[in-house]
């Protein structure tokens, strides 16, 4: 993408321009490498100068991300990245603000901040790297670990029922919710492209393999393409090696996996990511609570709703018109005040 370089000459940005001078320090074979490469390759498409791009992370393996992007960035507080990103986005609407988080960071200590950023529809892009484990702290179970997961912190198996991140996002009224896979660069890039174009909060769950503490958690989807239910807007939902399987919607609104030969092409659900009501998107998200079989990937929901940042700017502008220039001294001494004399 071409930008001015300050001397009147065009500057062509490439993936290399988004690679920082920091040594990338993840475990060899970690899925984060593939996601980083996809982001660095995609960034030039945005047409945004690097000084107007910001990556904010919390705590965890994924939180190293800002160090490796040649943009502005902040390695922030555990779980609080969406809150910090909200403050930055509403105060600097000229910036493109991205949050990088993990399933532990975002859904445990940060769950509160995540759902409120989504319901408010703040203009930020949230990338949740889901490896179903705490990797940085050496392999404890996370909010997305499956029931019965044996780890150092649950030697007899986890008793916690896991979150489904897409269902959670849709329940929080996310206007954009999508899922992709670390090793499918083409699909991930397409999802990122749609997320970046969305006005408001865009939530993207990325299945990311932790080859040290939870290796193979997503192999049913990463390695077996016939299990990928690829959601394509305006098309009937089919999957399988030869498209022999499909998705129908039951009378109660839930979705069911079927053989196309048994029900016929016309019975299959036509995916509509722009459907205002989130019922279909939610039903699709429930097809696979954990990725051990056929699992939907792609954009579940992509709808327009007033953006928090813009609403706030409009409110501030209205307040300024009503109150005029404003007098800080008068404001500080308005109402009940008192003076404390020191001795």
Image: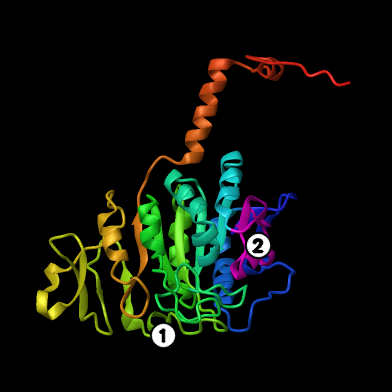
**Was residue 75 drawn as part of the magenta stretch in this picture?**
yes
Residue 47 in view in this figure: no
Question: Which residue is found at the position 28% from the left and 70% from the top?
Answer: 287
Disc 1 to disc 2: CB gap under 8 Å: no
**Quadrant location, the C terminus:** top right
Question: Which residue is found at the position 59% from the left and 76% from the top?
Answer: 33
Q: Which residues are magenta?
A: 49-78
From the image, tell me which residue sits under label 1. Answer: 223
Count of numbered labels shown in the rendering: 2
Where does residue 249 sit, x and y in percent of width and height?
A: 17, 64
Most foreground residue, 75 or 270: 75
Work out whether mark 1 precedes mark 2 in sequence or the reverse, and give the earlier one.
Answer: 2
Where does residue 239 sit, x and y in percent of width and height?
A: 27, 77
Most foreground residue, 61 or 156: 156
The quadrant where residue 331 appears:
top right
Where does residue 113 sit, x and y in percent of width and height?
A: 52, 51
Residue 141: give its label: none
Secondary element under disc 1, as helix, strand or loop, is loop
Q: Is residue 266 above or below residue 9?
A: below
Where does residue 300 sit, x and y in percent of width and height?
A: 34, 61
**Quadrant location, the N terminus:** bottom right
Residue 66: give its label: 2
Most foreground residue, 95 or 254: 254
Residue 150 in the figure: left or right of residue 212: left
Residue 217 in the figure: left or right of residue 284: right
Secondary element under disc 2, as helix, strand or loop, is helix
């Amino acid at each position: 993408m071409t930008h001015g370089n300050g001397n009147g000459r065009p500057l062509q940005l490439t993936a290399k321009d988004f690679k920082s001078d920091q040594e990338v320090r993840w475990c060899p074979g970690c899925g984060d490498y593939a996601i980083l490469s996809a982001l660095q390759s995609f960034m030039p498409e945005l047409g945004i100068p690097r000084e107007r791009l910001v990556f904010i992370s919390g705590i965890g393996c994924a939180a190293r991300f800002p160090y490796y992007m040649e943009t502005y960035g902040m390695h922030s507080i555990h779980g609080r990245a969406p809150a910090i990103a909200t403050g930055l986005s509403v105060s600097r609407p000229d910036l493109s603000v991205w949050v990088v988080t993990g399933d532990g960071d975002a859904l445990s200590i940060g769950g509160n901040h995540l759902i409120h950023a989504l319901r408010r529809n703040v203009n930020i892009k949230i990338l949740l790297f889901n490896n179903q484990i705490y990797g940085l702290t050496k392999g404890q179970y996370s909010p997305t670990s499956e029931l019965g997961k044996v780890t150092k912190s649950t030697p007899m198996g986890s008793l916690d029922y896991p979150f489904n991140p897409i269902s959670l996002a849709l329940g929080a009224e996310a206007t954009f919710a999508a899922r992709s896979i670390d090793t499918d660069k083409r699909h991930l890039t397409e999802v990122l492209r749609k997320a970046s174009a969305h006005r408001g909060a865009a939530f993207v769950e990325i299945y990311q393999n932790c080859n040290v503490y939870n290796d193979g958690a997503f192999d049913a989807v990463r390695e077996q393409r016939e299990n990928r239910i690829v959601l394509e807007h305006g098309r009937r939902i089919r999957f399988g090696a030869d498209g022999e399987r499909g998705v129908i919607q039951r009378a109660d609104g839930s979705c069911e996996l079927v053989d196309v030969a048994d029900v016929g092409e016309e019975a299959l659900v036509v995916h509509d990511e722009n459907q205002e009501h989130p019922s279909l998107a939610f039903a699709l998200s429930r097809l696979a609570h954990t990725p051990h079989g056929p699992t939907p990937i792609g954009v579940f929901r992509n709808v327009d709703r007033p953006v928090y940042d813009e609403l706030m700017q409009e409110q501030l502008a209205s307040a300024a018109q009503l109150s005029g220039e404003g007098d800080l001294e008068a404001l500080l001494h308005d109402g009940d005040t008192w003076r404390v004399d020191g001795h």
